[in-house]
């Protein structure tokens, strides 16, 4: 019984020490909508497939220095907030985009489509099942917002084939109620 009590207390201490990640705010959804619109929301796109969960951003990548060197007026609060939420892999929820058509793809479907083993090329199977997904599969991270909510940092990744993908760290700024990308850094290419 004593071991059980100690185990429960130990679990509570671990949970209490883990930094809390706030729920997704409407401002984050507005940033993601603006990013998707600016990247994929044109009439020529037939469909945009986005993973159902946020992707965890690898914080060990040297991205902070790039931000400070390239955007000197970027508030420290937006970097701190991005570090706090970037590893969260909670459910994305619904996001509307302007002219393109957005579809959320469940992780279980992706696991089944890209399961290892013999058989046809998995990307060919994907394209046959989702012929309108001209952008491949989009992954998004949570959005770090500055304390004044005028700056945002997020990461967007697109994969369309085994050697056809890229990931970008994106800084956005809100002016006159509209979010616009200010700077992008490519962090991954395949």
Image (tube, rainbow, N blue to C red):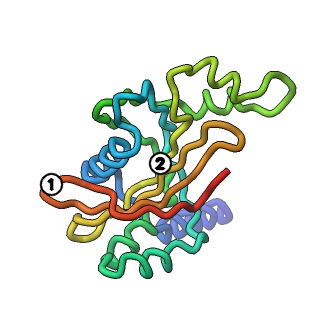
Distance from disc 1 to disc 2, alpha carbons, whole Å, reads 22 Å
Name the side, left or right, on which 76 lies relative to 64: left
Query: What residue is shown at x 54% (from left), y 60% (from top)?
Result: 186
Task: Return the mark for residue 140.
Answer: 2
Q: Earlier in the sequence, mark 1 or mark 2?
A: 2
- How crowded is the residue under tag 1: few (<14 C-alpha within 10 Å), some, or many (20+)? few
Q: Residue furthest front?
A: 44
Query: What residue is shown at x 60% (from left), y 71% (from top)?
Result: 60
Nearer the observer, disc 1 or disc 2? 1
Q: Residue furthest left?
A: 176
Name the side, left or right, on which 39 lies relative to 53: left
Question: Can you tell which quarter of the image residue 42 is in?
Answer: top left
Is residue 48 positioned above or below 31 on the image?
Answer: above
- How crowded is the residue under tag 2: few (<14 C-alpha within 10 Å), some, or many (20+)? many
Task: Return the mark for residue 159.
Answer: none
Name the side, left or right, on which 109 lies relative to 151: right
Determine the secondary structure under disc 2: strand
Query: What residue is shown at x 60% (from left), y 42% (from top)?
Result: 159
Is residue 146 positioned above or below 65 on the image?
Answer: above
Is residue 20 positioned above or below 102 on the image?
Answer: below
Is residue 46 positioned above or below 139 on the image?
Answer: above
Quadrant where the image shows the N terminus: bottom right
Residue at which label 1 appears: 177
Q: Position of residue 151 (x, y in %)?
A: 28, 66
Question: Can you tell which quarter of the image residue 71 is in?
Answer: bottom left
Determine the secondary structure under disc 1: loop
Q: Position of residue 125 (x, y in %)?
A: 69, 22
Q: Position of residue 134 (x, y in %)?
A: 52, 29
């Amino acid at each position: 019984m004593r071991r059980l009590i100690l185990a429960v207390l130990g679990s509570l201490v671990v949970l209490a020490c883990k930094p809390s990640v706030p729920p997704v705010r409407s401002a984050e959804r507005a940033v993601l909508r603006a990013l998707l619109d600016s990247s994929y929301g044109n009439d020529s796109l037939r469909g945009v497939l986005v993973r159902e969960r946020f992707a965890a951003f690898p914080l060990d990548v040297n991205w902070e220095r790039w931000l400070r060197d390239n955007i000197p007026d970027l508030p420290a609060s937006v970097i701190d907030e991005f570090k706090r939420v970037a590893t969260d892999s909670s459910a994305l929820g619904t996001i509307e985009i302007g002219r393109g058509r957005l579809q959320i793809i469940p992780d279980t479907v992706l696991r089944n489509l890209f399961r290892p083993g013999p058989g046809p090329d998995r990307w060919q199977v994907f394209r046959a099942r989702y012929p309108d997904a001209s952008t491949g599969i989009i992954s998004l991270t949570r959005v770090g917002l500055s304390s004044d909510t005028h700056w945002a940092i997020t990461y967007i990744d697109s994969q369309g084939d085994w050697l056809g993908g890229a990931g970008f760290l994106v800084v956005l700024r809100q002016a006159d109620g509209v979010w616009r990308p200010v700077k992008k850094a490519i962090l991954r290419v395949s």
